[in-house]
Amino acid sequence: RMGGIMDALRAEPPEEIAGTKTAGRSDYRESVRTDGGTSSPIALPKSNVLEFRLAGGGKVIVRPSGTEPKIKVYLSARGSSKEESLAEVDKLRTAVPSLLGIQK
């Protein structure tokens, strides 16, 4: 199931997450960074990790656990204050189940 989730995200990367446009993505397994219509290589070891960069500076990073049967999702957001940043992270957290194609 974890492989299916990662394959689906690669096949159809989200154009937006939690109402925020996806500005770019990095696929560390394929060693490719995409920003707009431009692709460039990633000079790091290959890993089954996807990074989605959001307009405004936020990120959603998705990877399967190497030791447990679960997907790990890392969220970051920028705001003009700590409270605004935390509110953005909460918005992203709410969007994770639909991003992964799972039901709560």
Image: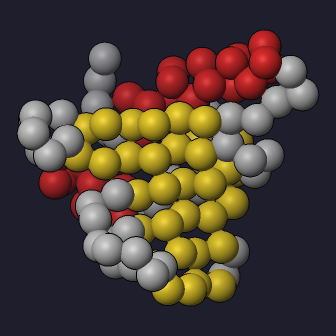
Say which quarter of the image contains residue 23: bottom right
Relative depth, front residue between 32 and 94: 32
Identify whether 43 is placed above or below 11. Answer: below
Say which quarter of the image contains residue 74: top left
Identify whether 95 is placed above or below 83. Answer: below
**Horizontal arrangement in the rendering, residue 84 relative to residue 17 (left or right):** right
Residue sitting at 76 percent across and 35 percent down? 78
Q: Position of residue 39 (x, y in %)?
A: 58, 84
Q: Is residue 11 visible?
A: no
Q: Can residue 3 be seen in this view?
A: yes
The furthest residue to the right: 80
Residue sitting at 28 percent across and 65 percent down? 47
Q: How many marks?
A: 0
**Horizontal arrangement in the rendering, residue 71 relative to residue 9 (left or right):** left
Identify whether 85 is placed above or below 62. Answer: above
Q: Where is residue 45 in the image (x, y as percent from the top left)?
A: 32, 74
The furthest residue to the top: 83
Q: Where is residue 86 in the image (x, y as percent from the top left)?
A: 68, 18
Residue sitting at 61 percent across and 36 percent down? 76
Residue sitting at 31 percent across and 48 percent down? 63
